[in-house]
Image (tube, rainbow, N blue to C red):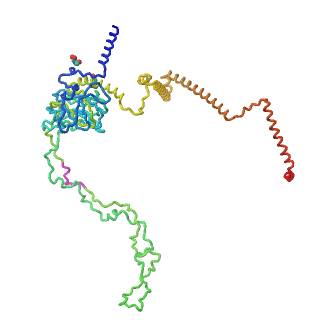
């Protein structure tokens, strides 16, 4: 009996644990939402069993699927979404809806998970103008609102575009938010919310945080082109008269003429050097060679046979040491002209006959209208994704289209936030890590002991590092303001002082022991002789007389030689 009850409670416990497993998917209870709210959380067996319609248009070859997420950063187990599968292909899908928002807010919210990241492509949603034909859904299909992430390279934005039609001309224009917020990158789920109030206020939230808030009516230039057409335009029927441009804007001044000596005074870049005078030995008119006056016609010269007699020439005797026959003005050195002004330019004056630039007449814009309810849209017939993206596997989920901000917040808080938490946890576990990722030093002992999977060695290493950090922090503070630091943390100061003295003593005690041993070792190495302590020892005394004796034996030999030093020969003879 005891075992059974024990088993029962164990089973009950297991059941509770499974039931409370926080990573198990629990669908959002739609009955919490108003009847006219549209909420799609993709609880379908497959795409075929869902009301979503894939475009059969020739351009759209992309595949769609309703499935669970496939990247490593999983959220809830069993949570399905709509996935655009193929990279680099056009994909279009839509959900037929019936939705109007005349004079009431429009709230559009959905989750995007760029499971493979996104380098270039869109993940935005369109609210399609009713009626729609889902099979033919394409880029030309009319829409009222376009909203969501779009990025390519460094371009990254959350699109917000409204399509407004001029009631007078019935022409429609897409008006873009000029400074859109940045979209979230990364491979986790992000939540995008658009809130449009009928009086022109709009709000974009990303993950529940307001990313943009403004009123279009107050600031119509937030959109491009602006919300309203211009009040005054140029008259398209006013055309430029013939001959308007016949007269030039400027003419040459008739009262000014070119001075006669302009070229001479101002027109040449160089002038003869005025400081150089003609040298005395310069004989311009004297020829360099003259006929030899001493030469006469020879007797035998026959003019008929030999031609006319020409006297030979000789160097002009007057030209010795002179320069003859050269024009001085061609040889004067030149210097830059200080008055040089360049070629003469005829000054110009405004032409009194000039008509000015032609401008068409300004008139009141007959097509002007004021869009006082910029967010009152035509009936919406579908929610559509019409995308191209470099990466596939973009997942959409929890699409809300309704009139209540509170509902969007409720959905965000009960579906997105817990999902984000799970994904972040899985991200920490599975994210790509750098090989030598720097680890921030622990802030407290608790933060060290909180770390999972810590070996004992690693634990102590971190602990020592933490202590060292504390000491260095304290030393730093102490350097900045010693008194203040001591007053603030007196215990720490005393503890560190003691610690320092203690360490100092140990280090020095150890050091002096080492030094002592070292000096001992060194002295025994370099002095192998016994210590010079002389004891009255027999052996020592005996040795000394022997040496002395030997010396004494040698000394007499020397003495003998020196004794006979006077008679060197005699020594040699010996
Ligand atoms: C959903 O909520 C409603 C009331 O808000 C409740 O009556 C219903 O039982 C809930 N459904 C589920 C499946 O929890
Ligand atoms: C959760 O609810 C609060 C208000 O109750 C709201 O400010 C916040 O944006 C919500 N979070 C999300 C993710 O929707």
Task: Return the residue found at the far bottom.
Answer: 299
Residue 280 x, y percent position in the rendering = 45, 73
Q: Toward the viewer: 398 or 168? A: 398
| Main SS, magenta residues | loop
Q: Toward the viewer: 324 or 528? A: 528
Q: Is residue 8 left or right of residue 510?
A: left
| Residue 184 is a magenta residue | no
Question: Image quadrant of ligand 2?
Answer: top left
Residue 348 x, y percent position in the rendering = 26, 56
Q: Identify whether 174 is placed above or below 101.
A: below
Residue 363 location, quadrant: top left
Res. 470 in view: no
Res. 48 in view: yes
Task: Return the residue found at the far top.
Answer: 1
Assign the N terminus to one quadrant of the image.
top left
Residue 248 x, y percent position in the rendering = 21, 55
Q: Give the residue at x 44% y 22%.
A: 445
Q: Toward the viewer: 269 or 46? A: 46
Residue 539 location, quadrant: top right
| Residue 355 is a magenta residue | yes
Q: Identify whether 274 is placed above or below 121.
A: below
Residue 439 location, quadrant: top left
In this picture, which residue range is highlighted in magenta?
349-358
Q: Give the residue at x 25% y 58%.
A: 253
């Amino acid at each position: 009996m005891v075992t059974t009850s024990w088993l029962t409670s164990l089973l009950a416990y297991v059941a509770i644990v499974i039931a409370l497993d926080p990573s198990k998917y629990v669908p959002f209870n739609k009955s919490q939402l108003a009847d006219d709210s549209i909420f799609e959380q993709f609880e379908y067996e497959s795409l075929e069993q869902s009301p979503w319609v894939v475009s059969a248009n020739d351009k759209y070859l992309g595949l769609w699927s309703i499935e669970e997420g496939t990247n490593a950063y999983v959220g809830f187990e069993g949570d399905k979404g709509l996935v655009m599968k193929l990279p680099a292909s056009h994909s279009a899908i839509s959900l037929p809806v019936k939705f109007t928002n005349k004079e009431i807010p429009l709230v559009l919210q959905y989750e995007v998970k760029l499971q493979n990241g996104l380098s270039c492509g869109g993940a935005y949603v369109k609210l399609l103008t009713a009626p729609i034909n889902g099979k033919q859904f394409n880029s030309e299909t009319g829409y009222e609102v376009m909203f969501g992430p779009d990025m390519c390279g460094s371009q990254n934005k959350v699109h917000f575009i409204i399509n407004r039609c001029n009631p007078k001309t019935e022409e429609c224009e897409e008006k873009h938010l000029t400074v859109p917020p940045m979209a979230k990158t990364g491979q986790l789920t992000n939540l995008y919310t658009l809130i449009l109030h009928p009086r022109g206020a709009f709000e974009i939230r990303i993950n529940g945080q307001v990313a943009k808030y403004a009123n279009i009516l107050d600031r119509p230039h937030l959109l491009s082109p602006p919300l309203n057409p211009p009040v005054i335009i140029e008259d398209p029927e006013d055309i430029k008269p013939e001959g308007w441009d016949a007269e030039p804007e400027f003419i040459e001044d008739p009262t000014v003429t070119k001075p006669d000596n302009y070229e001479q005074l101002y027109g040449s870049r160089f002038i003869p050097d005025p400081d150089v005078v003609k040298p005395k030995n310069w004989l311009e008119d004297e020829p360099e060679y003259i006929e030899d006056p001493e030469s006469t016609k020879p007797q035998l010269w026959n003019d008929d046979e030999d031609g006319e007699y020409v006297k030979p020439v000789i160097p002009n005797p007057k030209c010795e040491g002179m320069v003859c026959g050269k024009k001085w003005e061609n040889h004067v050195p030149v210097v830059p002209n200080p008055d040089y002004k360049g070629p003469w330019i005829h000054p110009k004056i405004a032409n009194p006959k000039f008509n000015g630039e032609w401008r068409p007449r300004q008139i009141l814009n007959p097509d002007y209208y004021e869009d006082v309810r910029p967010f009152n849209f035509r009936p919406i017939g579908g929610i559509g994704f019409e995308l191209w993206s470099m990466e596939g596997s973009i997942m959409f989920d929890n699409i809300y289209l309704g009139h209540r901000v509170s509902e969007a917040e409720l959905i965000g808080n009960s579906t997105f936030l817990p999902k984000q938490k799970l994904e972040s946890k899985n991200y920490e576990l599975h994210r790509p890590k750098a090989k030598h990722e720097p680890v921030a030093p622990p802030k407290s002992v608790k933060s060290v002991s909180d770390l999972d999977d810590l070996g004992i060695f690693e634990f102590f290493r971190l602990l020592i590092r933490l202590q060292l950090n504390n000491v260095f922090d304290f030393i730093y503070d102490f350097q900045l303001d010693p008194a203040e630091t001591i007053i603030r943390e007196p215990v720490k100061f005393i503890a560190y002082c003691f610690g320092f003295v203690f360490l100092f003593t140990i280090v020095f005690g150890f050091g002096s022991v080492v030094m002592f041993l070292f000096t001992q070792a060194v002295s025994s190495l370099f002095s192998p002789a016994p210590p010079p302590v002389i004891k009255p020892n027999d052996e020592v005394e005996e040795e000394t007389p022997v040496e002395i004796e030997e010396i004494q034996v040698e000394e007499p030999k020397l003495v003998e030689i020196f004794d006979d030093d006077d008679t060197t020969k005699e020594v040699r003879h010996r």
